Structures are given as structure tokens and as C-alpha cells.
Image (cartoon, coloured by chain):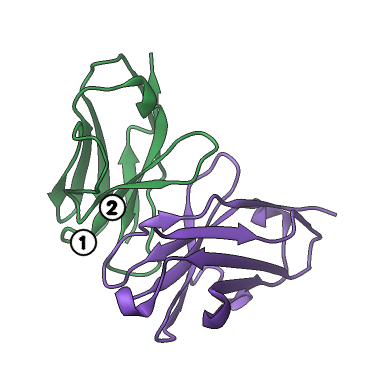
Amino acid sequence: SQLTQSPSSLSASVGDRVTITCRASQDISIYLAWYQQKPGKAPKLLISAASTLQSGVPSRFSGSGSGTDFTLTISSLQPEDLATYYCQQLNAYPLPFGPGTKVDVK
Amino acid sequence: QITLKESGPMLVKPTQTLTLTCTFSGLSPSTGVVGVGWIRQPPGKALEWLALIYWHDERRYNPSVASRLTITKDTSNNQVVLTMTNMDPVDTATYYCAHRPGGFSPFESWGQGTLITVSS
């Protein structure tokens, strides 16, 4: 299975609602994770099983979807959310990652 | 608390073999399924999973590079080692090790990464 993400990049203002889409080429149920990677840093797990928020992750982040279509939503964008966001399929090797969505804060 | 740290040469020459070591703490089979994987990221590009080893000795490799990879574990020293043969400049990337609890889990904890440059 392959993953696509849209958009590839976006620029939004502080307080805006931001939505990133990840699409799988075949049904992967809920076996999808979202990671945040800030510049020069390792990826950080935000969401597992499509919608389970990891401990310590701000509640403005949320995930939804199942099957082939998934979304990551930031309800109110903050300056510290400047990062690239990746989705990853979890139920089949080679555990592919999406190409990433770069989020810029205006 | 789980921590992982990668180590290896910063520079390798084309055709050489790369050996990377992931040293971890806070992982124990007594606390659940333990898997450690390697993921790489060329400069400015996306993440690519390479290999994974579980403590019950199951090994998995990305088919795109499987013929060049070997992953092993040294449980007594809390280390996982990845070797990649026949290195090429396109293998220049930051290499991360990360913990995967098992099943359909994501990579929950990551090392800081180590940049490996392939150049003559």
C-alpha cells in the first residue's frame, strides 16, 4: 500500500483550523499513525490507531478516518506547530510513510 | 523512561559497509513486546523504514533495500546493530532508531538520529 498526503505544504495564521489529509491506496482499517517533525529534530508520535492521541500531546490535535481516508486536524494553530507532519501505515510491511505536509505559521 | 541513541561513522566511502548501533534503555521484554527499528531520512526528504527486530528474533526488512541489510540484537548490552552493504551517495541520510512495541503499534520513541554522509 502507498500513502499520499495533501497538501504538500500550507501556511496558516495563529488560531486557524488546519486539516491535513492522508490517503491509502488500499483499505488499512484504522492502522495509521501521525508524527510531527520539527526542523532538525526526530519525529514525535502524535496519534496512533487513526484517532488515539498520545499522552502529553495537546488536545488541539485530533485524528479521524478509517479505511483509505484519514485526517489530522489542528483546531487552533500555534506558533510551535511549525513542523512537517507524516502519516504512516502500521498493518503491513514495509510500514510506509506518507510524503509529508509542511506547516508554516504566518 | 525509554531512551534510544544512534552511533556510527559520520562519513563512509562508496561501496563500503555501514555499521550503525542503537543503544537503548528502559526497554525490557518483561514490560511487553520489544521491537527496535531503523528509519532513515535523506536531507529534505521523507522518512523511509528500513528494518525491524523483535526480541523473539523476528526480523523484517524493507524489500527495497533488503539485500543490503542485516539487523541484529545484543540484549546483554541493550543494543541493536544495523549493517548496510555497498553504500552509495544516495544513502546519505539521517538514520534513526526507534521503539515499536509490537502488533500494529507505531514507533513510539525515537533516537535523536545520526547523519551519515556517503562520499569519496
How many residues crowd around disc 1 within 10 Å: few (fewer than 14), some, or many (20 or more)?
Answer: some
Chain B drawing hue: purple
Q: Position of residue A45 (x, y in %)?
A: 34, 49
**Considering depth in this image, is A44 or B51 the residue closer to the camera?**
A44
Identify the residue under disc 1. A28
Front-most of residues B99 and A31: B99
- For residue A57, which quarter of the picture? top left
Residue pictured at 37% horizontal, 70% vertical = A93
Q: In the rendered picture, chain A carries what hue?
A: green
Displayed quadrant of residue B59: bottom left
The chain holding disc 1 is A
Amino acid carrying label 2: it is Ala
Cα–Cα gap, marks 1 and 2: 11 Å
Q: Position of residue B89 (x, y in %)?
A: 72, 54
| Foreground residue among B38 and B28 | B28
Chain designation of label 2: A
Image position of B14 with respect to A74: above or below: below
Task: Give the residue number, with chain letter if any, for mark 2.
Answer: A33
User: In the picture, which quadrant includes the C terminus of chain B?
Assistant: bottom right
Judged from the image, the secondary structure of the residue bearing numbered disc 1 is loop
- Classify B42 as above or below A78: below
Q: Position of residue B78 (x, y in %)?
A: 53, 74
Give the quarter of the image for residue B19.
bottom right
* Amino acid type, mark 1: Ile
User: Could you tell me which secondary element the residue under label 2 belongs to?
Assistant: strand
